[in-house]
Amino acid sequence: MFAAAIEEARAIGSDYVFPGVRPRKIGDPVLHLNASSLTHEVGDVTGSTSPHRMRLAFGSVIVDLGYDEKDVAMVLDHKEGHKTTTARHYVRSDRLVRKRAILEAWEGSLEGPVAEAVRTFDPVATMERIRAARKGRQKGKRKRVPQLIAEYVQKRRATLRSEADALAEDRRIVKETLRGLGERTLSLAEVRRRLRLPEDA
């Protein structure tokens, strides 16, 4: 399966299993497909997946096939399972023989499920799902900015209304207090209390 994908890539002159469609800049060579594009494509076809889920599935299958967690780490970890100082600094082997055995076992475990998926594949339904997923992403981007602006304006208006109400209440209290002070119907302590002034003010 993977050997066929590699041969297909080589047949079109690419060094990548997932070749890009066009160069990133005019004049640049065509490199590999962008990782986020690949993630979107796989997610659109399957309904929901992510690189993390694929790594999780790989690790689970490999352990079920009889390999241990060190083997999973050797293939998945960025440090390739080099946990000790000695391994990190003094082991220069890529462990390709061991990795190849693990990946071939994994490929063998996928043959049946992939054959079943190919047998039951419905290209029309898949294209509809892909179109719907892409349309949903586009709509989400277009709607999000106006929706955020509307939410901000609504919150800001509520805050301004609240501040205006508080200011009107403060003005009312100050007017009544000054009137009472001018008419000498309020004590100094009562004025301090109404205006929320400290005792020594």
Image (spheres, rainbow, N blue to C red):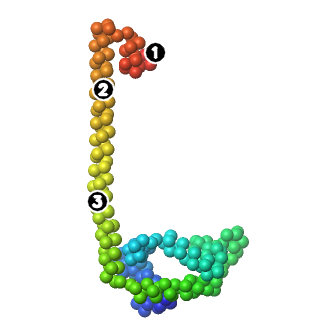
Residue visible at 29% across and 17% down in the picture: 176
Residue type at the position of mark 1: Asp
Residue type at the position of mark 2: Glu
Residue 95 % position (x, y): 64, 82
State if disc 1 and disc 3 touch (CB < 8 Å).
Answer: no
Residue type at the position of mark 3: Lys
Q: Earlier in the sequence, mark 3 or mark 2?
A: 3
Is there any visible trace of residue 27 in the rendered image? no
Residue 155 % position (x, y): 32, 44
Examine the rendered structure and indicate whether residue 117 appears above or below residue 140: below
Q: Quadrant of residue 23?
A: bottom left
Q: Which residue is identified by label 1?
A: 200
Residue 43 % position (x, y): 41, 73
Residue visible at 64% across and 74% down in the picture: 69
Examine the rendered structure and indicate whether residue 119 appears above or below residue 172: below
Q: Earlier in the sequence, mark 2 or mark 1?
A: 2
Q: Disc 2 versus disc 1: distance between alpha carbons?
A: 24 Å
Circle number at residue 143: 3
Give whichever of 155, 18 is nearer the camera: 155
Q: Which residue is identified by label 2?
A: 169
Q: Which of marks 3 and 1 is nearer the N terminus?
A: 3
